[in-house]
Amino acid sequence: MKQEFLHETKTHGMLTFPYTAYNGNLPEYLPSVPLHWHDEMEFIYVTGGGGVVTISSAAYNVKPGDILVVLPQMVHSIECYPNQQLEYFNILFRFSLLNASENDVCYEKYFKPLYNHTKSVPVYLESGTALNRQIRPHISYLTETREGRDVEDELMVKSSLFAIISYLNRHSLPVSNSELTLQNTYDKLKKVLLYIQEHYETDISVSAAAGMCGFSSGYFMKLFKELTGKSFSQYLKNYRLEMAARQLAEGGEKIIRIASDTGFRNLSYFTRAFTDKYGVSPSAYRKGMR
């Protein structure tokens, strides 16, 4: 059972209004949100609990009231602290929603540099900071009006998004050539992340993964840990365990079959690794999720 979330290609919201806001709760809905990216810009608004949000290799310990900014195509993940919940809202939208076309002066000045990552904006807006206080009323409006699910006041949604982008642009900075080079290098690593998504149940060696990017094994391992915060073997094991947790929560497949289907050839090793990560055995986890 493959999971399609690393590179999200679907449009969030409607084609005619590519915007959505939804509530997340870890680990109630999912055990975690692994590394992924998409074409939308995203705001993550933390409302309860605590956890770690990783954006383009930087990890942020988040708490209620914090806001995180994820530019289009940025690799990011979300996880809660052990034995805790993390509650948050996701707000996603495409720049096309704000009529940001190539013939628009606002697109060239404000949106294109963000989409191409030639300008950076603050990523972690900690609760209580000046920029957080400026943006938070607009974030609150967008999350409070999501309860009806269908957008009823498109103009107010656009107005709030324009205001947020305006505040962020006041704090934007040009990205240096060295940072652009690093971003291009990280983009090559996305090939490996996608390959893991599609083939995580198979044996994947470091040398094979490095070859996909055209890097030596040593250079690849260094860059991979910079991007993901984990070694290649740690990331692969962690990804397999997250896939196993989803299958345990969603179906009645035998545990030995789930272990095999997610790349674990030894049931005892799978049980130990799963218990180390989630604090309970696979069978107890399945029982608790039900």
Image: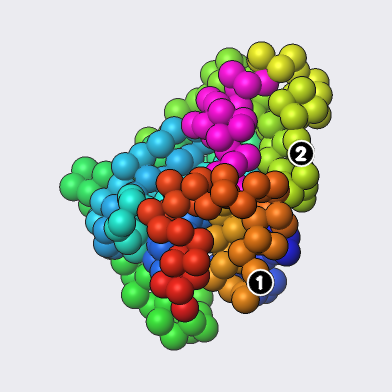
The numbered mark at residue 288 is: none
Residue at the extreme left of the image, as rendered? 128
Colour theme: rainbow
For the record, the magenta segment spans 220-240
Residue 153 on image: x %, y %: 46, 80
Tell me if residue 185 can be seen. yes
How many neighbours does mark 2 have within 10 angstroms: few (below 14), some (14-19), or many (20 or more)? few
Task: Tell me which label, 2 or 1, sits earlier in the chain.
Answer: 2
The residue that appears at 45% across and 65% down in the rendered structure is 285
Give the number of callouts.
2
Query: Quadrant location of the N terminus?
Result: bottom right
Kindly report the distance in space between the C-alpha atoms of the residues bearing marks 2 and 1.
Answer: 22 Å
According to the image, label 1 marks what residue? 253
Tell me if residue 111 can be seen. no
185 vs 74: above or below? above
Residue 166 on image: x %, y %: 42, 48
How many neighbours does mark 1 have within 10 angstroms: few (below 14), some (14-19), or many (20 or more)? few
According to the image, label 2 marks what residue? 203
The residue that appears at 61% across and 64% down in the rendered structure is 255
- The stretch drawn in magenta includes residue 38: no
21 vs 187: above or below? below
- Looking at the rendered structure, the kind of residue marked 2 is Asp
